Amino acid sequence: MICDIVKIFLTTAFALIPDEYVPAQESRTAITVTVTCEIFYFSSCLMHVLFAIHRIIFIVFPKRKEVWGSYTNHAIAVCVAFAVVKSFLTQMLDKDLYLMFDRKVMSWLFTMTPKTNLYKNIKMSLSYAEVVVVFILDAISFAQLTKLKKKISSSIWDANNSAEAKLVVQSLLQCWPTLTLVFFYFHVLPTLEDGFLIFLCSLTWNISSGMDG
């Protein structure tokens, strides 16, 4: 949630800078802002995977939850480090490849370079892979919950019958924003030419962040 709040705040603050004071799109200041937003975005996405791992540990491997708890901080650090690498991947591929904030359509757009499509495909593939991993892990957790339901008495289960629903809802709420963003940003946005439609499409970035948070 913190990651989502920070990236929305940075986007809003950057958009509110008066035109005469806004840094040039290719300036180090502007690129730093966009990279920072991406770090928080990627960190938020990777937290979904971490939460799914957390759920499967507590539901399927409850005896290992103490061991997992001792490694949680390390896992978070790895996720953040991976998010940083993903955010700087644009500059690693091409020094002229970076996100820029188009103030006319109020949207984050990639600069067009020979490596732009390659980076988009990498980013899109990683996003889909994260969602698939979450679905698989939660499917295993859900199956275990269903198995437990058959083993315990109905009276005990009825007192906790919201466990399955909560798991499904949490998984969907975490995956849906990412899927929505990836679909609109990588499949719909490139086909649009009208500035207003691009603006509406780019709203998915903030809407998805709000839903996720």
Image: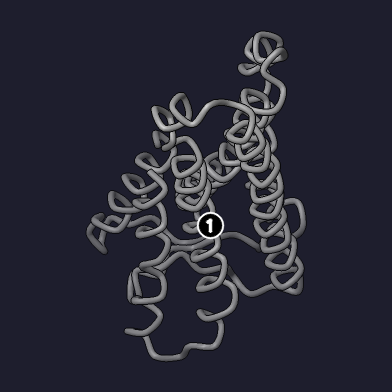
Residue 197 vertical placement versus 137 (above, below) = below
Residue 14 percent coordinates (x, y): 33, 53
Q: Residue 108: x, y in percent?
A: 46, 64
Q: Amino acid at mark 1?
A: Thr
Name the residue that disc number 1 marks: 178
Query: What colouring method underlies this structural image?
Result: one colour
Residue 213 shows in the view: yes
**Placement of the N terminus among the 4 image quadrants:** top left
Q: Give the quarter of the image for residue 51.
A: top right
Residue 198: quarter of image: bottom left
Horizontal side of residue 130 vs 210, given as left or right: right
In the displayed structure image, the side of residue 117 where residue 5 appears, left or right? left
Q: Nearer the viewer, residue 22 or 107?
A: 107
Q: Is residue 54 depicted above or below 93 in this figure?
A: above
Tally of numbered discs: 1
Instruction: Give percent across and percent down for residue 88.
Output: 66, 46
Question: Is 43 in front, or is 36?
Answer: 43
Q: From this viewpoint, is residue 36 visible? A: no
The C terminus, quarter of image: top left
Apparent side of residue 139 relative to residue 203 in the rendered image (left or right): right
The secondary element bearing badge 1 is classed as helix
| Residue at figure coordinates x 50%, y 73% from the top left | 184
Q: Counting other residues with Cα less than 10 Å from the Cα at mark 1, is it few (<14), some (14-19), or many (20 or more)?
A: many
Residue at 36% over, 58% down: 206
Residue located 65% across and 56% down the image: 127
Q: Is residue 159 left or right of residue 119?
A: left
**Residue that lies at the very extreme toward the bottom in this rendered image:** 193
